Amino acid sequence: MIVRLRTDFVPEGRLSRTEAADQRDGIESAQAGLQEHLRGTGYQTMREYETIPYIALDASPRALQAIERSAFATDVVEDHLDEAYVDESAPQDLDAPSLAQSTPLVQAPSMWAEGFTGSGRTVAVLDTGVDSAHPFLSGKVVEEACYSASSNCPNGRTSQTGPGSGVPCTYVASGCPHGTHVAGIAAGRGSTFSGVAKGASIMSVQVFSRFTGSSCAGYSEDPCALSYTSDQIAGLEKVFSLRSTRNFSSVNMSLGGGRYISNCDTDPRKQIIDNLRSASIATVISPGNDGYTDAVGAPACISSAVSVGSTTKFDTVSSFSNSASFLSLLAPGDLIYSSVPGGGFDYFSGTSMAAPHVTGAWALLKHQDPPASVSTILSKLQSKGLAVTDNRVAGGVTKSRIRIADAAGIPPPPPNDNFANARIFSGYSYAANGTNVGATPEGGDPVKVSSSSYTNRTVWYQWKAPFSGPVEIDTCSYYTDFDTVLGVYTGSALGSLTQTAANDDGCEVGNRNGSRVTLMATKDTTYHILVDGYADSKGNFTVEVVDKLPPKVASTNPSSGGKVAPGANIKATFSEPMQVNGVNATTYKLKKAGTTGFLGATVTYDPATRQATLNPNNNLRSGSTYIATVTTDPHDESGNPLDQNASVDGYQPKTWKFSVN
Ligand SMILES: [Ca+2]
Ligand SMILES: [Ca+2]
Ligand SMILES: [Ca+2]
Ligand SMILES: [Ca+2]
């Protein structure tokens, strides 16, 4: 049982150093006074807390009677057992939001692109232990502790601190991987996907104990892993005690139990959560998986905690998630693919998976704004999140699904940030304004030009070549206002692209920072065009695809050597779209063979068919031969003059002869 002592308590962050020391003295005196009062009644002290007015005891009925009579005690509560909030009934749907999908949903990559990875911050994970040897968590576990009233710490005792103390329990198959999964969501780091605060460190606090038989009734396995309230308080107090050596942003508790339709501020965990909050450390707690729409579990019901319900990747409240009017936030928790002990990954569902998204978000937001209080960050996440209404019940509550970059005031990614969302264009030439402000790296982004460190603010375009020939692609326009890097690739998927061309620079003098590449395009091939910033720079640009292939006359009617009726029009069809006003009676003309004067005629050009029509003012003379000419003056849309003979240097006109019936 956990006994509340009769002594004043104010969260330490609001006290001076001297006042805090006095408060601790008062707590210690009350503990000693109660123990003295209980002498000979049959009790054992399980946990003495240093900063909050509680003591955990194992008490006989006689001792309990003595506690109830003692002036040192004001309240006694049972030392509850909590479960880890994973929903084992969730279907193992492989079309699931792995971290690769859930972290973009909460805008973590936009924070990473700004340099806010949670580096220099620590997240504490009170759970079933964390596999610090997992590659996803490599080098991250900087503090460890274990509190297990059933003596299930690695040393076989009820408490252990230091390296090796926070390793995963091993006595239950489905429960013990829980902590490693949760830690991966909050702070894992991989090559193709990462957890939310991929730069943050982790403190693993193992707070679970092994139970069998009736204690495991209602759980999916026996033995089962459950956590005592008194052990959780000890773990939270350990975090609090290390706050000056570890820069904690947040503590994750994906555990709990019970059904509370309003705040539960008599819960003995409230004072230590208040202490943490007074030191600007958030305690982020899962509300449970019972599907309640009006209630959450404890300790999520504590008013000073941050409670996090679960959403799907479609931004609906997960069927299993508990929720209530006093829930703090929502985050993805449905089928999240994260680390499990031994080096692998697995899909877990539950509000257990939602809370660590917020725990990680806290590390990113504290990285951006180190002094921010819990209230400041919470109100930003609440006001800038995506409003999701709980549609499981009529009049369901509306809560914010977190959007971290929005909360941080960082621009969201442009629509063509990801390879799969490339802006698509076609045609011989193209120009579009774009931006890489808010753009983010994506796993498998190709290395451009020379350095992998530039693979960062990437945006994508896609161009299907309508012809084979030389092409120039550039960002040389004066609209471009930052130092771009440009790459062109073929292939179908990130990670397996082939570079066709890439360049940092290459524009004419006057635009030092734009980029230009040339390539020989192949008709009907799709080219993936990547615009990035040199050394992470960002801004606005124009990307242009410029056809460098001169146009020519592809066919004529009549053909060379053919015959027409005296009243016929003479037609020439170009190989590609032409500038309309360049095709006229000066650039397309007709004369009778053996003469020098060109005939009066009207010339029209139809862009849809690329066909020019020469309509002579007078009928042509029967039996005569005529010579038609298209000069080199008509230009294609990119400004290339006509060149009828690619194998001869310079530009050659199109000339052909025909006769009249
Ligand atoms: Ca990108
Ligand atoms: Ca450049
Ligand atoms: Ca052309
Ligand atoms: Ca030529």
Image (cartoon, grey):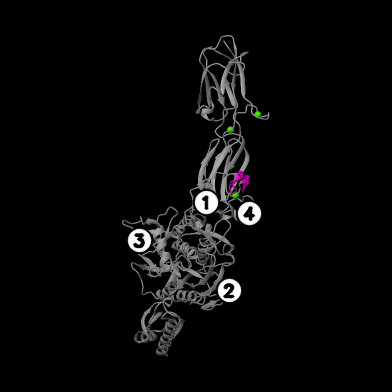
Q: Please, which residue is most extreme toward the top here?
A: 623
Task: Choose between 600 and 622: the one closer to the eye.
Answer: 600
Q: Amino acid at mark 4?
A: Ser
Q: Position of residue 168 (x, y in %)?
A: 54, 69
Residue that label 4 marks:
451
Distance of label 2 from label 1 (alpha carbons): 46 Å
Pick whichever of labels 2 and 1 is earlier in the sequence: 2
Counting from the top left corner in percent of width and height, residue 321 is at 40, 60
Q: Earlier in the sequence, mark 2 or mark 4?
A: 2
Between 521 and 2, the one nearer to me in the picture: 521
In screen coordinates, is 130 left or right of 315?
Answer: right
Task: Answer with the quarter of the image where residue 259 lies.
Answer: bottom left
The secondary structure type at the circle numbered 2 is loop
Disc 1 or disc 3, which is closer to the eye?
Answer: 1
Tell me the tag on residue 163: 2
State which tag comes first along the sequence, 1 or 4: 4
Element at label 1: loop
Q: Nearer the viewer, mark 3 or mark 4?
A: 4
Labels 2, 3: front one: 2
Q: Give the residue at x 63% y 26%.
A: 644
Rendered image: mark on residue 293: 3
- Residue 489 in the image: state x and y as whole percent: 60, 44
* Marks 1/4: CA–CA distance: 20 Å
Q: CA distance from mark 2 to mark 4?
A: 37 Å
Q: Secondary structure at mark 4?
A: loop
- Which residues are the magenta region? 498-516
Q: CA distance from mark 1 to mark 3?
A: 45 Å
Q: Position of residue 452 (x, y in %)?
A: 62, 54
The kind of secondary structure the magenta stretch mainly shows is: loop
